[in-house]
Image (spheres, rainbow, N blue to C red):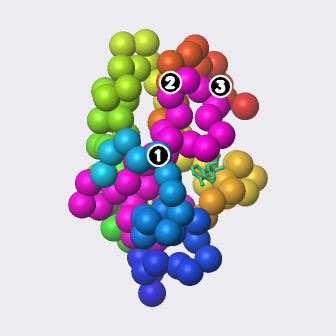
Amino acid sequence: MAGEPQADCLFCKIVAGEVPAAVVRESATTVAFRDINPQAPTHVLVIPKVHHPDAASLAAAEPGIAADVLREAGQVALDEGITEHGYRIVFNIGAGAGQTVFHAHAHVLGGRGLQWPPG
Ligand code: AMP
Ligand code: ZN
């Protein structure tokens, strides 16, 4: 069923505590943890505890939780002290856009100059 944990999903396993992660924030509906392969001095992932394959699917099915992800991403940026110089929240959707983990997640990137447009 939509939103149920998926046995083969890495991020569901992080939510369940079955795979370790460097957690920086947690809320009733979300977990934020450091990316294992950081692309910037701050690179944190914010995920919903429920499983949806990407951010658009999450927003369509559970818009309140999508809003929680976005709010937590902003709080991570505040916690990390990256708001003054600007930061980026990225949702890769689909393999062609670089999505490799098919459990919705926001990347929070900052602490260095960020080029626009992204590659
Ligand atoms: P995406 O390519 O948008 O699907 O993002 C997936 C992200 O998850 C990548 O930036 C990976 O480096 C990151 N990642 C993969 N495995 C782990 C893990 N065990 N802990 C933390 N981050 C991970
Ligand atoms: Zn999942």
Check disc 1 and report the residue beneath it: 22
User: Is 44 contained in the magenta span?
Assistant: yes
- What are the residue bounds of the magenta stretch? 27-55
Left or right placement of residue 28 versus residue 60 in this view: left
CB-based contact (under 8 Å), mark 3 and mark 1: no
Tell me the quarter of the image containing the N terminus: bottom left
Query: Is residue 118 rendered to the left or right of residue 64?
Result: right
Q: Residue at x 24, y 60 (%)?
A: 28
Tell me where residue 49 appears, x and y as whole percent. Answer: 38, 65
Front in this rendered view, residue 105 or 36: 36
User: Residue at left 37%, top 54%?
Assistant: 31
Q: Give the mark nearer the N terminus: 3 vs 1.
A: 1
**Is ligand 1 within 8 Å of the beta carbon of the residue shown at mark 2?**
no
Secondary structure state at the residue bearing disc 1: loop
Cβ of mark 1 under 8 A from ligand 1: yes
Q: Image height check: is 57 above or below 30?
A: below
- Beta carbon at label 3 within 8 Å of ligand 1: no
The CA distance from mark 3 to mark 1 is: 30 Å
Vertical comparison of 42 with 91: above or below: above
Residue name at image x 63 percent, y 19 percent? 115
Crowding at mark 2 (Cα within 10 Å: few <14, some 14-19, many 20+): many
Instruction: Check disc 2 and report its element: helix, strand or loop.
Output: strand
Where residue 118 sits in the image (x, y, percent)?
Answer: 66, 29
Q: Find the distance from the CA under tag 3 to the CA under tag 2.
A: 15 Å
Instruction: Give residue 80's mark.
Output: none
Q: Which residue is mark 3?
A: 117
Residue 110 tag number: 2
What percent of the width, then of the height, locates residue 58? 43, 64
Whether residues under marks 2 and 1 lie with C-beta atoms below 8 angstroms apart, the answer is: no
Horizontal side, residue 10 vs residue 110: left or right: right
Name the residue at 65% across, 25% down.
117
